[in-house]
Image (spheres, grey):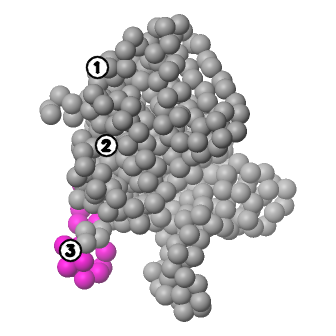
Amino acid sequence: MKILVCNVGSTSLKFKLYEMPEKKVYATAKVERVGSETEAIYSFCNTATGEKIEKNRLCVPKYKDGIALFLDDLLNPRQGILKAISEIEAVGFKTVLAKGHHGVFELDDAVLGAMRDYLFIAPAHNQPYLDAIGEFKAMLPGALLVGSFETAFHKTIPPERKLYALPYDWYEKYGIQRFGFHGHSHEYTARHLPELTGKDKFRAISCHLGGSSSLCAIEDGKSVDCSFGFTPQTGLPHAARCGDIDAYIVPFLMNEGMSLDEITTAFSKNSGLYGISGVDSDLRFIEEAANAGNARAKLAIDLFVASIVRYVGSFYAELGGLDYLTFAGGIGENSITVRRRVCDALGVFGVHIDPEKNSAVHGECELSAPDSKVKIYTIATDEEQMVAMKTYEYSLSH
């Protein structure tokens, strides 16, 4: 069964075409700067032949134009991938949040309506997906469109860690709770650790660190806590989103003359690593600035590391110890500095990283020092594969 997986960003599209259940990848592609009429970038790779296509300075004003680029290459006889668009039987999406929906669902009108219900709390995620899903409905009318929601993996978090200390009827009436996100990445880690270690019983803390960052406490393959809360704005500081704050900062700023729109825009676009550093939202540039003596860039890194350590300490206590500490995501896999500083701060828990291994990371690696009581890994989590698997499983049962 051929399943196309689409990962939608506010100005980007990522694609993978799978044969399931074999997990064979036929092709991958990425469109950057969607919305530009002169500067869009497109890259395509035929995984069977290794052929790569790179195109720059394209006109891709809408998602449908980016989708068309990928579909055209899939149908190109020279690529030998598809003879007809109808061969794509399903499209899977790494959807984020929908009111009352925490699992895998066909993206019918009811589910799309539930995504619209939560536009206010996940504007950077839900609107791009709604737009792209609408285009796929028109372009692939015979395909099953499936949303695999990021919150599903965290349904096993117990209520004492899931609920806020708010009036209980707010939970019943509005569904306010700690949903948790990055479920595909954390679930990939949870499923992969037994393959990596040969053990089904374990306590792990999964650190997905990137433009959006979160930690997940995993016990025997199940999520038992997550740093994310009701919305993707919470938890650790993100690239440009604030993470955890005191709720009364909002009425305080409104009393100072700011509008709610100004405040929420600042929380989601001008905060996080960017807000503290004043340099960039990309940690690579922040690290460069910190190394050059920029005090605010150094402070942004210090704050980020301190937040990670705070959550690890909490999750360590909840788990009653720790067997594995894992790093994934753009920062988790690539920042030698963040991994080192986090592990150095966790020495009290018996976490000791090997400096040479940490400096030579490429892909999946074990980084533990010989005397470390906790095994440390980098894991290149394959979120698209998780979506393909869940889409395939859903198609069999519906």
Q: Which residue is mark 3?
A: 173
Give me the disc on residue 147.
2
Q: How many marks?
A: 3
Horizontal and vertical percent for residue 9? Answer: 51, 46
- State how far apart marks 2 and 1 are (Cα): 17 Å
Q: Main secondary structure of the magenta part?
A: helix
Lower sequence index among marks 1 and 3: 1
State the CA–CA distance, disc 1 to disc 3: 41 Å
The answer to which quarter of the image holds residue 114 is bottom left
Pointer 2: residues within 10 angstroms few (<14), some, or many (20+)?
Answer: many
Residue 68 on the magenta segment: no
Q: In the visual, does 390 lie left or right of 226?
A: left
Q: In the structure shown, which secondary structural element does the residue marked by tag 1 occupy? A: loop
Q: Secondary structure at mark 3?
A: helix
Quarter of the image with the C terminus is top left
Image height of 60 relative to 85, above or below:
below
Counting residues from the start of the chain, the first of labels 2 and 1 encountered is 1
Numbered circle sitting on residue 1: 1
